[in-house]
Image (spheres, rainbow, N blue to C red):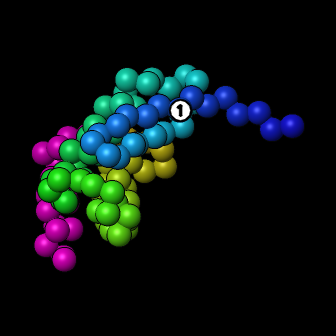
Amino acid sequence: SFRCNLKIVYKRYASLYFSYAIEDQDNELITLEIVHLYVELLGKYFGSVCDPDTIFNFEKAYFILDEFLWGREVQEISKKNLKPHVLFLKKLD
């Protein structure tokens, strides 16, 4: 049988829930910080983030997520370094 030892970490922002499945040895607080950074970056792109933004523009939401997470590993956490990428995506629209 298949056994998976994962923890679910989630955070609610307004009407949106962000959830991640993490391994037992992973830190929940770091995961919550990653969620918070993601919400801040979504806010820079969409303004006020709501359900339709993430549903109808999911490819942009994934692009933003890919800018700092790659292969389940954090690649960049500096908002200063990430902001130009988010603004570049906004210019493409």
How many marks do you count on the picture?
A: 1
Q: Give 15 or 47, whichever is nearer the viewer.
A: 15
The x and y percentages for residue 14 are 27, 42
Query: Is 38 a magenta residue?
Result: no
Identity of the residue drawn at 36% across and 31% down: 32
**Residue 49, above or below 19:** below
Q: Give 10 or 51, whichever is nearer the viewer.
A: 51
> In which quadrant of the rendered view does residue 76 lie?
top left
The magenta region covers 76-93
User: Quadrant location of the C terminus?
Assistant: bottom left
The x and y percentages for residue 1 are 87, 37
Farthest front residue? Answer: 15
> In which quadrant of the rendered view does residue 67 lie?
bottom left
Judge left or right: residue 66 versus residue 44.
Answer: right
**Residue 31, above or below 66:** above
The x and y percentages for residue 34 are 33, 37
**Residue 16, above or below 92:** above
Farthest bottom residue? Answer: 93
The x and y percentages for residue 15 are 32, 46
Callout 1: SS? strand
> In which quadrant of the rendered view does residue 28 lie?
top left
Identity of the residue drawn at 55% across and 22% down: 25
Mark 1 is surrounded, within 10 Å at the Cα level, by few (under 14), some (14 to 19) or many (20 or more) other residues, namely: few
Residue 78 appearing in the image: yes
Judge left or right: residue 85 versus residue 18.
Answer: left
Identity of the residue drawn at 32% across and 63% down: 52
Q: What is the three-letter code of the residue carrying label 1?
A: Ile
Query: Is 92 a magenta residue?
Result: yes
**Residue 92, above or below 25:** below
What residue is disc 1 on?
8
Q: Dominant secondary structure of the magenta stretch?
A: helix
